[in-house]
Image (tube, rainbow, N blue to C red):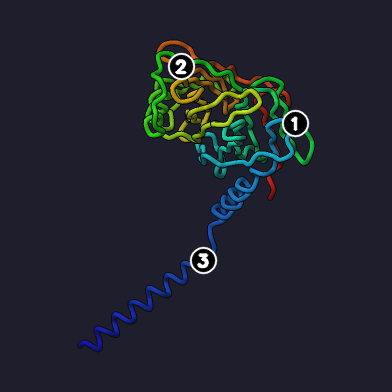
Amino acid sequence: MKTASRMTGLLAMIALVLAARSRAEEPEDEPQVETKKLNDVIEGSIDWYDLYPDPSAKDPMRPQPVLRWRNVARGQEGEAMMVVWAHRGRPLAIASIYPWQGYLNHEFGSLSRSAQLLARDNGNVAWSPKSPGVELRPVPDAPPPAETPAARLRQLKSIAGRFKATMTGWKGDNSDREELRLLPRPLYRYSVTDPQDGEPAVLDGALFAFVMGTDPETVMLLEAVGTQGSATWQYAFVRATSGGLEVRLENEVAWRAEKFQGPRSPTDTTRTLARILPR
């Protein structure tokens, strides 16, 4: 009886091994293969364009992915991502990278306090904003920045939560209006302890995303500008969509962006560059 039992157990184990091997040898579904290829292209595309903090800079800034998402509601294929370019600690530009209608789009937004940002495509100037990307404003009724990074992180989250963002129109007929959700964790956190070229010191700073699902539609820049003991909280917003946006602080409009009605100029503070998707 023991021998028969061992034989039955052995046969069962062999059957399980053969079944697992058979599943491993089965070809992947074609849609899964295509999605993986597309995601690989998107992942590799972060180096397609070189961004410089100013025209005299010799070396481009290094792109850093900070968020990945997929907007199924808009029929997006593959995984999109948001990338940040920083210089001397401070983020100067963001880009949403996503596939759309056979093209891979890089939707850039300037976070620079100056008009020096420059993007090149294979050596050619592709984007050169002629005005600052952000204008920071004081946060009303904000407490003084705390002494420790952990305490300031709690302040950052609390202050960001006071703002409410709304998409005011993305469809062609502007029939849509949607309240956006604040992601609880910062996309990117930084400080600037050795400012140069007239830039202020930043004791602490962070980027926060307001999203539809997990798709960022606007990004908030929140900074404790100054040094310990003298810093104050300041904020700015930058669009991450072609749709209209409205941000309120309590009951007052804090920032608004109108829906784009046509293509953007290479000198605008936002710029979308597109290439045909490699196949």
Number of other residues with Cα within 10 Å of mark 2, as a class: few under 14, some 14 to 19, many 20 or more: some
Tell me the kind of residue under disc 1: Pro
Left or right placement of residue 197 versus residue 180 in this view: right
Disc number lying in front (3 or 1): 1
The residue closer to the viewer here, 201 or 135, is 201
Looking at this view, is 266 or 130 the one in front?
Answer: 130
Q: Residue at x 46, y 34 (%)?
A: 186
Which residue type carries mark 2? Val
Whether residues under marks 3 and 1 lie with C-beta atoms below 8 angstroms apart, the answer is no
Label of residue 26 in the image: 3
| Disc 3, SS | loop
Q: What residue sits right under mark 2 in the picture?
A: 139
Disc 3 marks a residue whose amino acid type is Glu
Q: Seen in the image, is 272 located left or right of residue 75?
A: right
Residue at (57% x, 55% y) in the render? 33
Residue 70 position (above or below residue 210): below
Question: Is disc 1 surrounded by few (<14), some (14 to 19) or many (20+) residues within 10 Å?
Answer: few
Q: Position of residue 11 (x, y in %)?
A: 34, 81
Return the residue at label 1: 55
Sequence order check, earlier mark of 2 and 3: 3
Q: Quadrant of residue 152?
A: top left
Label 1 residue SS:
loop
Q: Secondary structure at mark 2?
A: loop
Please provide percent x and percent y for residue 234. 49, 20
Label 3 vs 1, first from the N-terminus:
3
